[in-house]
Amino acid sequence: MFHVEQEDKMENKTGTSECKTAHGRPITSYKDKDGNPLEVFTYDFTYDAYTEDKDGEAELVKDNNQLTLLEQLKVRNAERVSNARAKQLAVELTNRGVVKPDAKNDPQVLLKDIFDKLMITKLYDVEGARKMATQVTGIEWA
């Protein structure tokens, strides 16, 4: 006797999204690899989505006070869209030379990191921590 497992019914779909911000900043505040200002851009992404079919299982799931199969499909497909869009956006930003700001490549991030550490000590108020962070780094607040 042979047991054949049923494969998930999937279909490849394409979506389009628009990039207005990257890493919490407007995309227009970044420059591309050639030093030119970036503009808002759109990009396409692909993802696999479950097909929506009804085979009687939805009623069984419903009786157990869970999401119906159709609701599960919608949730899972929304997750897949979000995941695919985020992955493609990372590729698009990399291709445009956008690097996530960190303490090594953005002085303001370094300044904020030191400020946060000073605030954790509870030895400074906000203004004192800001002044000390500037004094230590030589970086002025933007």
Image (cartoon, helix red, strand yellow):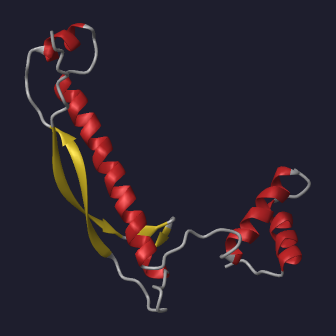
Q: Which of 106 and 33 is in front in this view?
A: 33
Q: Which residue is drawn at 38% across and 71% down?
A: 92
The answer to which image quadrant residue 96 occupies is bottom left
Q: Nearer the viewer, residue 93 or 29?
A: 93
Image side of residue 33 versus residue 139, left or right: left
Q: Quadrant of the C terminus?
A: bottom right
Q: Above or below — where is 139 with respect to 69?
A: below
Residue 46 in the image, given as x and y percentages of width and height:
24, 56
Q: Which residue is drawn at 32% across and 42% down?
A: 79
Q: Residue at x 25, y 51 (%)?
A: 47
The answer to which image quadrant residue 62 occupies is top left
Q: In which quarter of the image is the N terminus?
A: top left
Q: Which residue lies furthest to the right in this view?
A: 123
Image side of residue 5 versus residue 19, left or right: left
The answer to which image quadrant residue 49 occupies is top left
Q: Which residue is drawn at 35% across and 62% down?
A: 88
Residue 120 in the image, given as x and y percentages of width and height:
82, 51
Image side of residue 4 versus residue 138, left or right: left
Number of marks present in the image shown: 0
Q: Above or below — where is 65 with respect to 32?
A: above
Image side of residue 110 versus residue 125, left or right: left
Residue 65 in the image, given as x and y percentages of width and height:
27, 11
